[in-house]
């Protein structure tokens, strides 16, 4: 990663980063980090055109309504592996009330957690071998260490997120979900699958 890109990524990981993502969609940063803009897949469609049935985690009051429709993994011209996630995140409440929320990608027992605060954490958890439940989220939030570059949350919109994966993720199947914690209650979206391509 050259100095300009490293500076941009570091800036994104400050408190001002959330405002930048909301106002600009993070497209400039995505282009710098991932390479050519053509590497970013179109907004519609999932892996192989497949779509998933979704059910909101909750839609009452200020509870976050989290539902994913598709996830598509791709490898940019720069070699960075990334995932585009489509769905309904309802993160306006998250931004207003500042409760923990983000995106989790896991492959076997390996995971990367992309927090709205700007932190990206990676590690391993044996319980991920059979998926992630709401009861396990609190444990997962306490695991891992700072993920190496180029891991980043590049873009976050009400219906779309774009993330760059840490280098330890290999080609093959992976799972994606979004989460939020409100008043000590964990909310998870449905989990969707994607296939990370090889280099």
Image (cartoon, grey):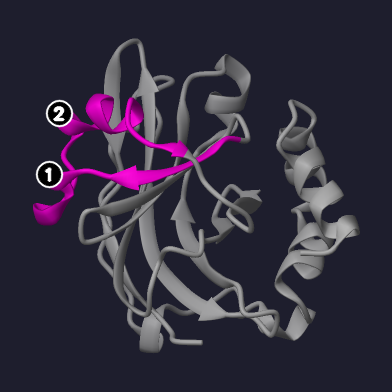
Q: Residue reaching furthest top?
A: 183
Q: Which residue is mark 1?
A: 127
Local packing at callout 1 (Cα closer than 10 Å; few below 14, some 14-19, many 20+) is some
Q: Quadrant of residue 2?
A: bottom right
Q: Is residue 50 above or below residue 93?
A: below
Residue 131 shown in magenta: yes
- Residue at 75%, 30% (x, y): give it: 14
- Residue 196 at x, y percent in the picture: 40, 77
Q: Residue at x 38, y 89 (%)?
A: 48
Of callouts 2 and 1, which one flags the residue occurring earlier in the amino acid sequence? 1
Look at the numbered discs 2 and 1 and tell me whether their residues touch, using CB distance below 8 Å: no
Answer above or below: position of 136 versus 7.
above
Q: Residue at x 56, y 18 (%)?
A: 98
| Front one among 21 and 104 | 104
| Rendered-image quadrant of the N terminus | bottom right
Specify whether 117 is left or right of 16.
Answer: left
Residue at the far left: name it: 130
Image-based side of 135 in relation to 194, left or right: left
Q: Find residue 5 and report its image quarter.
A: bottom right
Span highlighted in magenta in the image: 119-145
Closer to us: 113 or 49: 113
In the image, is residue 72 part of the stretch drawn in magenta? Answer: no
The residue that mark 2 highlights is: 135
Nearest the viewer among 45 and 79 is: 79
């Amino acid at each position: 990663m050259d100095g300009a890109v490293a500076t941009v990524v570091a800036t994104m990981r400050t408190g001002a980063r959330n405002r930048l993502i909301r106002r600009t969609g993070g497209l400039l940063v995505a282009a710098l980090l991932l390479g050519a803009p053509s590497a970013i897949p179109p907004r519609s469609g999932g892996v192989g055109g497949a779509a998933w049935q979704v059910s909101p985690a909750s839609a009452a009051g200020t509870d976050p309504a989290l539902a994913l429709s598709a996830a598509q993994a791709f490898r940019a011209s720069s070699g960075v592996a990334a995932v585009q996630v489509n769905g309904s995140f309802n993160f306006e409440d998250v931004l207003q009330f500042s409760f923990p929320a983000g995106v989790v990608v896991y492959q076997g027992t390996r995971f990367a957690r992309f927090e709205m605060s700007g932190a990206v954490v990676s590690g391993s958890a044996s319980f991920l071998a059979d998926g992630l439940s709401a009861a396990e989220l609190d444990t997962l939030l306490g695991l891992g260490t700072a993920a190496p570059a180029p891991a980043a949350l590049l873009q976050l919109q009400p219906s779309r997120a774009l993330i760059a994966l840490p280098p330890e993720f290999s080609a093959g199947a992976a799972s994606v979900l979004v989460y939020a914690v409100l008043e000590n209650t964990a909310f998870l979206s449905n989990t969707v699958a994607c296939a990370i391509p090889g280099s």
